[in-house]
């Protein structure tokens, strides 16, 4: 049986996890990068979609062993070379200040 919304009588939409692999972002070239503006260290624009794209993209770093392994439980313990690699890679997909 499907879950039915009692008010409208339509089937309820299933909850999903959201974007986990970002294939459109990983497939970008240098010319297709989008700019993200920061204010006091927080991304603010130019559009909410670009901020969401950046957030989803950065979250994929934690699930990818190419960037950082699970042996680091603290950001301060991550080697500076790994941080620099992640920053350079993010700059190939987004225009960051």
Image (cartoon, helix red, strand yellow):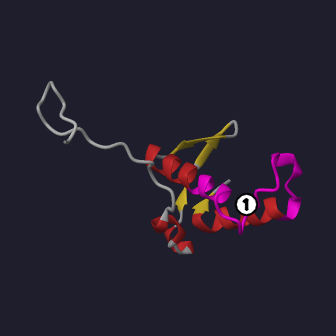
Residue 56 drawn above or below residue 29 = above
Would residue 28 appear left or right of 73 to someone viewing this image?
Answer: left
Q: Nearer the viewer, residue 73 or 52?
A: 73
- On the image, the x and y values in percent for residue 8 come to 12, 29
Q: Which residue is mark 1?
A: 87
- Residue displayed at 31% across by 43% down: 14
- Residue displayed at 75% across by 61% down: 68
Would residue 8 appear left or right of 87 to someone viewing this image?
Answer: left
Magenta span contains residue 62: yes
Would residue 65 appear left or right of 36 to someone viewing this image?
Answer: right
Q: Quadrant of the N terminus?
A: top left
Would residue 16 appear left or right of 55 to someone viewing this image?
Answer: left
Q: Nearer the viewer, residue 2 or 51?
A: 2
In this rendering, the count of numbered labels is 1
- Looking at the image, the residue that sits furthest to the front is 1
Magenta span contains residue 32: no
- On the image, the x and y values in percent for residue 88 come to 72, 66
- On the image, the x and y values in percent for residue 40 come to 69, 36
- Residue displayed at 54% across by 69% down: 26
- Looking at the image, the residue that sits furthest to the top is 7
- Residue displayed at 23% across by 38% down: 12
The secondary element bearing badge 1 is classed as: helix
Residue 29 drawn above or below residue 20 = below
Instruction: Characterize the local packing of mark 1: few (<14), some (14-19) or many (20 or more) Cα atoms within 10 angstroms.
Output: few
Residue numbers of the magenta segment: 57-81
- On the image, the x and y values in percent for residue 35 come to 55, 56
């Amino acid at each position: 049986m499907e879950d039915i919304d009692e008010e409208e009588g339509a089937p309820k939409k299933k909850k999903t996890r959201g974007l986990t692999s970002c294939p459109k972002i990983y497939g970008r070239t240098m010319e297709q990068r989008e700019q993200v503006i920061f204010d006091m260290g927080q991304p603010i624009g130019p559009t909410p979609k670009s901020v969401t794209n950046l957030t989803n993209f950065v979250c994929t770093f934690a699930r990818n062993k190419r960037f950082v392994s699970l042996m680091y439980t603290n950001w301060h313990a991550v080697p500076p070379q790994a941080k620099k690699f992640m920053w350079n890679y993010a700059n190939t997909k987004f225009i960051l200040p």
